[in-house]
């Protein structure tokens, strides 16, 4: 599973908007960020558990939350059932600074996506 796939699946599950562009201006220069998942309450950054680039999730979640007036949240996707040094450090710092943190299992997300048509069918026939 790629990070982009995880973002699409998880954001749909959470009822948010995936890859939401948020514009801002600094020193008269217009620029923007992309929030992985924006819900009514959270600016969520999603990362894979075994990548050093997941460290950026804390920074992005915090900055994006400030830009959107939401709470920051970091979600890591567990791909190997093993807590790496990256996961441990991200969770430790997130909790120390009041950033919501969660881990979701990659296989759960795949199963949820695979069964979405069945849930939709049941919902239509209730």
Image (cartoon, helix red, strand yellow):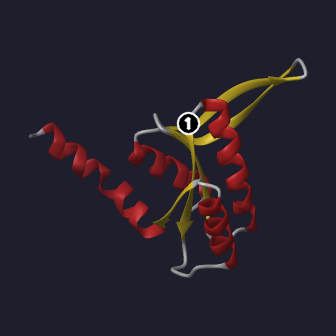
Location of residue 30 by image quarter: top right
Q: Position of residue 91 (x, y in %)?
A: 61, 67
Q: Position of residue 124 (x, y in %)?
A: 16, 37
Q: Nearer the viewer, residue 91 or 77?
A: 91
At numbered mark 1, what does the secondary structure look like: helix, strand or loop? loop
Q: Position of residue 121 (x, y in %)?
A: 19, 44
Q: Nearer the viewer, residue 121 or 51?
A: 51
User: What is the crowding at mark 1: few (fewer than 14 residues within 10 Å), some, or many (at least 20)?
Assistant: some
Q: Residue furthest bottom?
A: 82
Location of residue 35 by image quarter: top right
Location of residue 115 by image quarter: bottom left
Instruction: Answer above or below: position of 36 versus 94.
Output: above
> 122 left or right of 112?
left
Q: Residue at x 35, y 58 (%)?
A: 112
Q: Residue at x 38, y 55 (%)?
A: 113
Q: Residue at x 66, y 35 (%)?
A: 66
Q: Residue furthest left?
A: 126
> 77 left or right of 26?
left
According to the picture, the residue beneath numbered tag 1 turns out to be: 70
Q: Residue at x 54, y 64 (%)?
A: 77
Quadrant where the image shows the N terminus: bottom right
> 86 left or right of 69?
right
């Amino acid at each position: 599973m790629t990070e982009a796939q995880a973002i699409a699946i998880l954001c749909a599950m959470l009822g948010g908007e995936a890859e939401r562009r948020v514009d801002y201006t600094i020193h008269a220069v217009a620029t923007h960020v992309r929030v992985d998942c924006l819900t009514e309450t959270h600016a969520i950054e999603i990362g894979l558990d075994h990548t050093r680039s997941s460290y950026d999730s804390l920074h992005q979640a915090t900055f994006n939350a400030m830009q959107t007036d939401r709470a920051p949240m970091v979600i890591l996707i567990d791909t190997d059932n093993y807590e790496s040094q990256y996961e441990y450090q991200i969770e430790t710092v997130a909790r120390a600074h009041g950033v919501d943190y969660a881990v979701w299992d990659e296989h759960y997300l795949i199963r949820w996506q695979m069964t979405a048509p069945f849930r939709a069918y049941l919902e239509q026939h209730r």
